[in-house]
Amino acid sequence: MTTTQKLIQPKLGLLKLAEKLGNVSDACKVMGCSRNSRGGGPILSVPKAL
């Protein structure tokens, strides 16, 4: 497993859990992290409608 893969795996796991739970905040609570602490910024970047 490459270093990049090692860094991405936990984030993918968090996103899969968020999808299953339907809520990013709840997934972060289960995983024991802050929504803003993963990767130095927001987990999901949702573009704003124009």
Image (cartoon, rainbow, N blue to C red):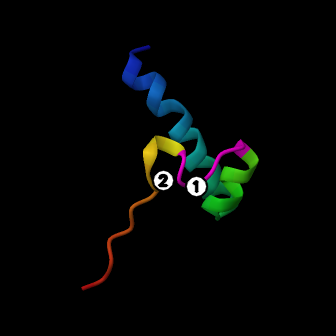
- Mark sitting earlier along the chain (1/2): 1
> At label 2, which amino acid type do we have?
Ile
The residue most toward the right is 30
Mark 1 element type: loop
Q: Is residue 49 left or right of residue 41?
A: left
**Mark 1–mark 2 contact, CB under 8 Å?**
yes
Q: Residues within 10 Å of mark 2 (few under 14, many from 20)?
A: some
Q: Is residue 42 magenta?
A: no
Residue identifier under label 2:
43
Residue stretch in magenta: 31-37
Q: Residues within 10 Å of mark 1 (few under 14, many from 20)?
A: some
Q: Quick one: 15 or 3, which is closer to the camera?
A: 3
Q: Is residue 25 above or below residue 32?
A: below
Give coordinates of residue 23: x percent, y percent: 64, 64
Residue 35, numbered label: 1
Residue at image point 65% right, 45% down: 33
Give coordinates of residue 15: x percent, y percent: 55, 49
Q: Is residue 32 magenta?
A: yes
Give coordinates of residue 50: x percent, y percent: 24, 85
Q: Quick one: 34 or 12, which is closer to the camera?
A: 34
Residue at image point 40% right, 18% down: 3
